[in-house]
Amino acid sequence: MSMISTSLSGPKSATSYCAPEFSGLRRLCPNNNTNNSHSPSFLRFTSPRKPLRRVLAMAGTGQNGTKESITKLISDLNSAKMESDVDVVVAPPFIYIDQVKSSLTDRIEISAQNSWVSKGGAFTGEISVEQLKDIGCKWVILGHSERRHVIGEDNQFIGKKAGYALSQGVGVIACIGELLEEREAGKTFDVCYQQLKAYADAVPSWDNIVIAYEPVWAIGTGVVATPAQAQEVHVAVRDWLKNNVSAEVASKTRIIYGGSVNGGNCAELAKQKDIDGFLVGGASLKGPEFATIVNSVTSKKVAA
């Protein structure tokens, strides 16, 4: 598999950057005039000169699991050997967070799968950031495809949720990604840029944000983006951050990939320069396989 360049030549915008063509997909060359300006669950990094992007391995289990199966998964994770220079986070269903927090090794941090847009109150069925902090969650996943395309949360609402979580000291796994029809229509970058802008307009800082690129057509389908397809979007996302936020934020922000990641494909994906880890779905339900994913790329060294 050939690798694409990790830098973009010429003007870097949705209207000027045209990604290489890949088999089975149309060119990702946006042809509209979207304004992209910003107006207001594995790697090892070493460098003697520059700050480093420490890699993140993230496990999101969705609505999967029972008390029994989660107990088994916790046991597997507690006994697994995981490299010390990889940040590992798990995101169990809400009702099992306390069970996981009380028995999982401190080596692994806990994330929630969603949170409310503001301070808790009379919002039946929602979970507040304050409640998540109270039970020990350090992260929350926001903007996942099901929240966007099934529940109906729009970009601005998700951005506000991210801003509030960060204001309360909870880190955000900020998901972005396109539908299959959007990719086939050549709108991948436009979609991702619009989602990024909504975050950028709402967050107080990028210090505690991890961006998760998850092409919706690859989530839970068994179809994974090729390493080059994933890399081209990660490069474009980092370039957007450079042009619309700052070069420092672009350099430091971790951008992880999600979408049918498993023990068999993670190593090739991880070789890409701008893939800083994984958001793992189904494969994270198998402790040994998740450990394989965590450890699969620890030999990679990339300076931010």
Image (spheres, rainbow, N blue to C red):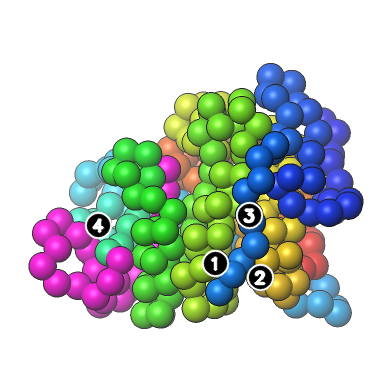
Q: Which residue is mark 1?
A: 200
Name the residue: 74% across, 58% down.
239
Left or right relative to 198: residue 268: right
For the residue labelled by badge 1, is the local secondary structure a helix, a strand or a loop? Answer: helix
Q: Is residue 247 left or right of residue 277?
A: right
Asked if marks 3 and 2 touch (Cβ < 8 Å), the reply is no
Q: Which quarter of the image is occupied by the C terminus?
A: bottom right
- Quadrant housing residue 119: bottom left
Q: Amino acid at mark 1?
A: Ala
| Residue 10 versus residue 49 in the image, above or below | above
Q: In the rendering, which numbered label is found on residue 245?
A: 2
Question: Which residue in the protein does label 4 denote?
Answer: 94
Residue nearer the viewer, 289 or 214:
214
x, y percent for residue 199: 50, 63
Q: Amino acid at mark 2?
A: Val
- Residue 5 is inside the magenta segment: no
Between 269 and 104, the one nearer to me in the picture: 269
As measured in the structure, the alpha-carbon distance from the residue carrying label 3 to the one carrying label 4 is 37 Å
Q: Which mark's residue is nearer the viewer, 3 or 1?
A: 3
Membership of 142 in magenta stretch? yes
Q: Which region shows up in magenta?
A: 117-145
Numbered disc in front, either 4 or 1: 1
Give the mark nearer the N terminus: 2 vs 1: 1
Element under disc 3: loop
- Sequence order check, earlier mark of 4 and 2: 4
Q: Which mark is residue 35?
A: 3
User: Looking at the picture, how far across and down is residue 248, in whole percent?
Assistant: 72, 75
**Counting residues from the N terminus, which is met first, the one under dot 4 or under dot 1?**
4
Distance between mark 2 and mark 1 Cα atoms: 8 Å
Q: Residues within 10 Å of mark 4 (few under 14, many from 20)?
A: some
At x 53%, y 27%, the residue is 181
